């Protein structure tokens, strides 16, 4: 596993070097940045913006080092303006990305929310990914187990999960295999890496990630 929790064993996945850690790893574990038309640094969460890019591991400490050591200008070979709160903006964009992907999975019938529905999917082995809000009751969450050979996401808030399902809050959710599940896991792992240092906000309470 790389920093930020992304697996490094995906065959054929392009690799890039993190400017903060010096590690070479698959792009799915990194955040790409580009310089905008006026030299402003822009996080490219989807990796699709035009122009020369530079990469930092999806890890809060690595991102902060890149900002504090002024590594972006060195890598992009020119002056760049780093906006205030860049790391928080990266976190916000990653969270929005994960929420949007879960919402798309819900609309296609590959995601459910609510304790009873999630319990039913787990019992029928229809769920591949168990998602539980970080601010939910530990006792309540412990009643549901991560699917065998499945994945666990436990660092979204109940409000964020609620946004994905069109509700005020959601504590328990599950995703079926296929569809968008792989992309949800990848981007959720990047989000976890960026949130890891925040007072346990990114901890999964001992559950498998």
Image (cartoon, rainbow, N blue to C red):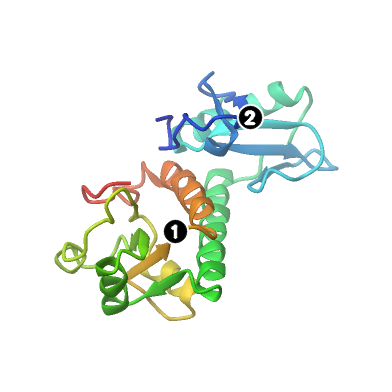
Residue 70 seen anywhere in this rendered image of the structure: no
Q: Which residue is the extreme one toward the right?
A: 37
Q: Where 15 falls versus 50 (above or below)? A: above
**Residue 53 placement: quadrant:** top right
Q: Which mark is residue 164?
A: none
**Residue 131 placement: quadrant:** bottom left
- Which residue is drawn at the image coordinates 74% and 33% (left, top)? 80
Which residue lies under the disc numbered 2?
14
- Which residue is drawn at the image coordinates 53% and 70% (left, top)? 103
Left or right, 185 with reference to 139: right
Q: Where 26 falls versus 191 (above or below)? A: above
Percent x, y of residue 4: 43, 37
Which quadrant does the N terminus fall into?
top left
SS for dot 2: loop
Left or right, 184 with reference to 141: right
Left or right, 170 with reference to 186: left
Percent x, y of residue 162: 43, 74
Q: Distance between the residues labelled 1 and 2?
A: 24 Å
Q: How crowded is mark 2: few (under 14 residues within 10 Å), some or many (20 or more)?
A: few
Q: Which of marks 1 and 2 is in front?
A: 1
Residue 127 seen anywhere in this rendered image of the structure: yes
Of residues 83 and 150, the one nearer the viewer is 150
Left or right, 199 with reference to 42: left
SS for dot 1: loop
Of residues 79 and 31, the one nearer the viewer is 31
- Which residue is drawn at the image coordinates 60% and 45% (left, top)? 84
Q: Where 62 falls versus 197 (above or below)? A: above
Mark 1 or mark 2: name the one nearer the start of the chain: 2
Of residues 207 and 81, the one nearer the viewer is 207
Q: Which residue is the extreme one toward the bottom?
A: 167
Which residue lies under the disc numbered 1?
177
- Which residue is drawn at the image coordinates 27% and 75% (left, top)? 115
């Amino acid at each position: 596993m790389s920093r930020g929790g992304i697996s490094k064993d995906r065959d054929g996945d392009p690799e890039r070097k993190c400017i903060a850690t010096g590690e070479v790893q698959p792009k799915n574990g990194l955040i790409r940045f580009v310089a905008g038309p006026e030299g402003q640094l822009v996080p490219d969460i989807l990796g699709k913006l035009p122009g020369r890019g530079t990469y930092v591991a999806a890890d809060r400490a690595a991102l902060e080092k890149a900002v504090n050591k002024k590594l972006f200008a060195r890598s992009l070979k020119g002056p760049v303006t780093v906006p205030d709160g860049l790391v928080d903006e990266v976190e916000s964009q990653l969270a929005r990305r994960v929420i949007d992907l879960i919402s798309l999975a819900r609309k296609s019938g590959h995601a459910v929310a609510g304790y009873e529905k999630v319990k039913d999917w787990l019992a029928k082995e229809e769920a591949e990914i168990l998602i539980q809000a970080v601010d939910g009751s530990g006792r309540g969450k412990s009643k549901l187990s991560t699917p065998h050979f499945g994945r666990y996401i436990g660092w979204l808030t109940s409000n964020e999960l609620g946004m994905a399902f069109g509700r005020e809050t959601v504590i328990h959710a599950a995703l079926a295999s296929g569809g968008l599940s792989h992309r949800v896991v990848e981007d959720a792992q990047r989000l976890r890496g960026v949130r890891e240092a925040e007072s346990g906000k990114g901890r999964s309470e001992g559950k498998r990630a």
